[in-house]
Amino acid sequence: MGIHRDVAVQVSRATSLPAVAAAGGYAITVPQIIFGELIKLHNMKTFDMPFEFAPVKIVAGYHVRDEKSPTVAWLRRKFHEAAREVKTNFMLHYGTKVK
């Protein structure tokens, strides 16, 4: 398609994207089902993408010490369920290094 975008900012927590975009005048590409309320909070406008694009990849990290935690296991299941519901690619990483 010949579409190109310049990435101006990368953030470690996706929930900060609407605030960064609103403060800096940036456009962001985020799943509305996940970020809809944050976008409303910052009084941002939303638009449908004018073209098809690859599924959004969402990555969550957790420490290896929490691998056997029932609470963290429950939370991981909830993330996977939500990702299936919105048909999003979701990857879960654990350990000290997240690529």
Image (cartoon, rainbow, N blue to C red):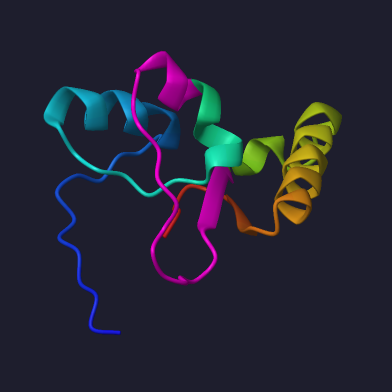
Q: Which residue is found at the position 63% from the left and 57% from the top? A: 90
Magenta highlight range: 38-61
Question: Residue reaching furthest top?
Answer: 41
Q: Residue at x 42, y 15 (%)?
A: 41
> Is 39 in front, or is 83?
39
61 with respect to 69 (left or right): left
For this rendering, which residue is in front, 92 or 18? 18
Q: Quadrant of the N terminus?
A: bottom left
Q: Which of 63 and 84 is in front in this view?
A: 84
Point 17% across, 23% down: residue:
23
Residue 59: image location, x then y, percent: 53, 51
Task: Give residue 36's position: percent from left, percent from top.
Answer: 53, 30
Quarter occupied by residue 67 = top right
Q: Quadrant of residue 73?
A: top right
How far across and how far down the image is residue 64, in percent? Answer: 63, 44
Check if residue 42 falls in the magenta segment.
yes
Give the vertical position of 56 relative to 16 (above or below).
below
Q: Which residue is drawn at 61% across and 39% down?
A: 33
Coordinates of residue 42 in the picture (x, y in percent): 35, 18
The quarter in which the C terminus is drawn is bottom left
- Residue 82, compared with residue 40, is above or below; it is below
How many numbered discs? 0
The image quarter in which residue 66 lies: top right
- Principal secondary structure, stretch drawn in magenta: loop
- Relative to 27, 73 lies left or right: right
Indicate yes or no whether the magenta region holds residue 47.
yes
